[in-house]
Amino acid sequence: MTDNRKTILIRSPNWIGDAVVSTSILGPIRNFFKDSRIVMVTKKYVAPVFDNNPFIDDIVIFSGYKDGIAKIKGSIGIILPNSFSSALLFALAGVKRRIGYKSDMRALLLTDKIPMPSLKQERLVDNFKRIALHVIGSENTCNFVPGIFLREREIDNNIKQTKALHLKEKPVIIDPGAAYGPSKIWQVEKYARLIDYIKEQKKLPVVLLGSAASLSLTRRITAATRNKPIVLTGKLNLRESITAISGCRLFISTDTGAMHIAAAFGVSQIAIFGSSSPKWTGPLNTEALIVYENLPCSPCFKRICPLGTYECMKNITLKKVEHFVEKLL
């Protein structure tokens, strides 16, 4: 049977954390376009964030212009990334109405040109919300709250995994995060002492999570501990990591994609910020505590410290993070 409904295309961000935050607009858009098809257009590695989301009808995964042009079919395109390439893709695919920020020399590619706000001076969720409200109207009062939705079998598999690891209690999960660069990495020795503190003082299991990019860092942290954590770094795919995070007792990380995943589930969390800004990408979670030194040189948003000192991370003491652990456990 042919589906004659209007199709609303949403081009997702390319960073996992940004993609999680972008899910905040899906409920309001679904509420407005009740009888339309809503389709996420995304890269493969980000797609699991949108899996099983009740507000969308389909996910289109594309790998380049040729592939995208062949797959992308719709009448309205909401373009969340600010890149020239994302607007060009929708234009080449023949999407009639193309909505996004007027940025990166792409004004001619958009039909609805939203004035570019001062990036990183507001919350990322508000940046996405402004685009959505341009489409559905500023009078819309729906909540813009990120959401990730698990299937029953994923929850069951998480329980089985917990049993397989011989965990009697929900673990504390730590994702030290290394993919962005050293400016977001807390010190190895501090992580090691924090793990020892949680295991010795709180008697809770600790699991190290993260992508394969963090494996070297994780190994150094583990080697420096007295009480070895369970290392799942690089062993889980994104969906499995999402499921694991959803069931933890406490989540500790730097400003990573996983930080936003934890926030979407409302788990207790500690977010450690260095070169980035909690004002821009802080976790949208009432159960989150943020560690941030707010030095005169920060946030610089650089992968590598321009001064070579990394003081924004080095100044964050183990004692301060332990104090936050005490508050949340």
Image (cartoon, helix red, strand yellow):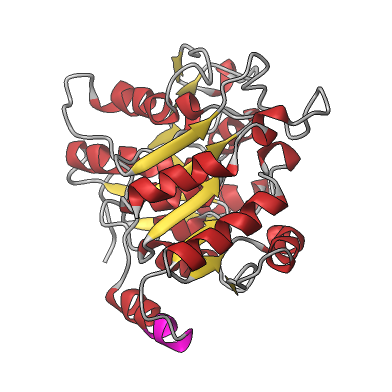
**Which residue is at the far front?**
201
Percent coordinates x, y for residue 158 in the rendering: 39, 77
Percent coordinates x, y for residue 89 in the rendering: 59, 38
Is residue 18 shown to the viewer in this render?
yes
Q: Nearer the viewer, residue 226 or 172?
A: 226
Q: Which region shows up in magenta?
A: 160-165
Is residue 9 shown to the viewer in this render?
no
Q: Which quadrant would the C terminus be assigned to in this image?
A: bottom left
Q: Nearer the viewer, residue 320 or 276?
A: 320
Q: Is residue 212 above or below residue 256?
A: below
Q: Is residue 250 above or below residue 65?
A: below
Taking the spot 40% from the left edge, 55% from the top edge, the residue there is 50
Q: Is residue 161 magenta?
A: yes
Q: Is residue 49 magenta?
A: no
Percent coordinates x, y for residue 286 in the rendering: 29, 39
Taking the spot 56% from the left edge, 46% from the top edge, the residue there is 256
Q: Is residue 244 left or right of residue 187?
A: left
Q: Is residue 150 left or right of residue 291?
A: left
Q: Is residue 201 above or below residue 73?
A: below
Q: Which quadrant would the N terminus be assigned to in this image?
A: bottom left
